Image (cartoon, helix red, strand yellow):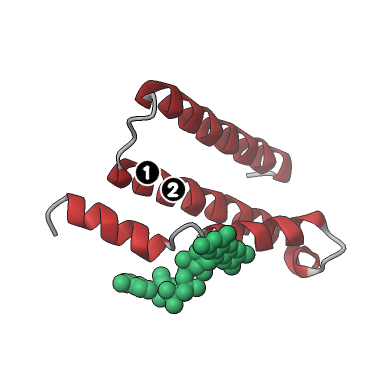
Amino acid sequence: MGMDAYAERARRELRATGETARKRQVETRGELTAQEAAGAKMWATETQWEIIDRCLQLHGGYGYINEFEIARLWRDARVQRLYGGTTEIMRDLIGRSLGF
Ligand SMILES: Cc1cc2nc3c(=O)[nH]c(=O)nc-3n(C[C@H](O)[C@H](O)[C@H](O)COP(=O)(O)OP(=O)(O)OC[C@H]3O[C@@H](n4cnc5c(N)ncnc54)[C@H](O)[C@@H]3O)c2cc1C
């Protein structure tokens, strides 16, 4: 896949993620359960991380240098998997709701 096509796909996926989250917010009208919130948080942050990490990879070594915006995006995406409840804790909550 060429760089433009890849960037377009990343944009599409990010847009879809945002739209799904907004739609879900409207649908739940404040009735989001802790398990659903954990699922949404885990899915959104892991998807963001996967996309941004692949975008950095496209930049090669320059992607790691602070002068390039992708480096900041990558660092910011990484912390999403930690604060507000780590991905492991989200998985734990989801697992418990499934009876594990
Ligand atoms: C930039 C930033 C801003 C923050 N802002 C706030 C804020 O405004 N308010 C606030 O209250 N907190 C805030 N925090 C704290 C944040 O919520 C915690 O860092 C986060 O909950 C993880 O806790 P911890 O750092 O103590 O890691 P730990 O709990 O020590 O976890 C370390 C690792 O062990 C894993 N782990 C821990 N327990 C389990 C388990 N039972 N099963 C499997 N794996 C496990 C974790 O997933 C993680 O990978 C912030 C953190 C950062 C980095």
Q: Is residue 6 above or below residue 25?
A: below
> In the image shown, does 82 or 49 lie closer to the viewer?
82
In the picture, residue 66 is in which quadrant? bottom right
Local crowd size for mark 2, using a 10 Å CA cut-off: few (<14), some (14–19), many (≥20): many
Q: Is residue 32 above or below residue 1?
A: above
Q: Amino acid at mark 1?
A: Ala
| Image mark for residue 41 | 2
Element type at mark 1: helix
| Image mark for residue 18 | none
Q: Is residue 84 above or below residue 64?
A: above
Quadrant in the picture for the C terminus: bottom left
Q: Is residue 88 above or below residue 84?
A: below
51 lies left or right of 74 = left
Number of numbered callouts drawn: 2
> Farthest residue in the right direction?
67
| Image mark for residue 37 | 1
Element type at mark 2: helix
